[in-house]
Image (spheres, rainbow, N blue to C red):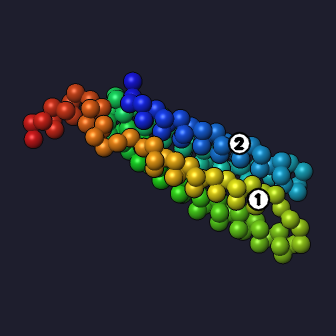
Amino acid sequence: MPPLRTIWFACISLSYSILLFGTAMIMPRLTSQGGLGFGQMILPGSLATLTLTLTIMCLLIKRNYKVGMVGIHLALLMPLITTSLLSFKAWNLYQESTAANSLTSQATLLGMTSITSIYVFVTMMLIRPKKEEAPSTMDLEEKTITSAQ
């Protein structure tokens, strides 16, 4: 079983991927094309899938220390990457709606998800597993390699 802080970290990351999946499911309903805009689901859906994959990787820290650490560190970066990509998409949607004199709720939804991503990043930084806990989670092969050196 992974350490408790890793489990909390994974719960936050899992909640974040559920938020991104929800954003992906709501996006087609907010289009002006009558629900035919499934292309808007691609960005939040792919980010949610990647975040879910990294969550599973960080829970594998007891079985394979390196995979777990890669999962934790990339999961820390995901909210920042998501913020930049969704903010850029929201800004483009806002510019298009301003030019057409019509307000779009897609830009608002993406903007709110971007702001939530910043809060998720700060929470993940505060809850991430401590460095002194990491060596106790190494598997047997890595402990013998480290102690032999």
Callout 2: few (<14), some (14-19), or many (20+) C-alpha neighbours within 10 Å? some
| Residue 75 visible in the snapshot | no
Callout 1: few (<14), some (14-19), or many (20+) C-alpha neighbours within 10 Å? some
Q: Residue at x 39, y 29 (%)?
A: 2
Secondary structure, mark 1, is helix
| Residue 65 visible in the snapshot | yes
Quick check: 70 above or below 83?
Answer: above
Q: Return the residue at label 2.
A: 22
Q: Residue at x 76, y 59 (%)?
A: 108
Does residue 104 appear to the left or right of 72 in the view shown? Answer: right
x, y (%) of residue 1? 39, 24
Q: What is the residue that sits farthest to the left in this orientation?
A: 148
x, y (%) of residue 139? 26, 29
Which residue is more in the foreground, 99 or 33?
99
Q: Return the residue at label 1.
A: 108
The amino acid sitting under disc 1 is: Thr
Does residue 43 appear to the left or right of 65 in the view shown? Answer: right
Q: Residue at x 88, y 55 (%)?
A: 33
x, y (%) of residue 63? 34, 28
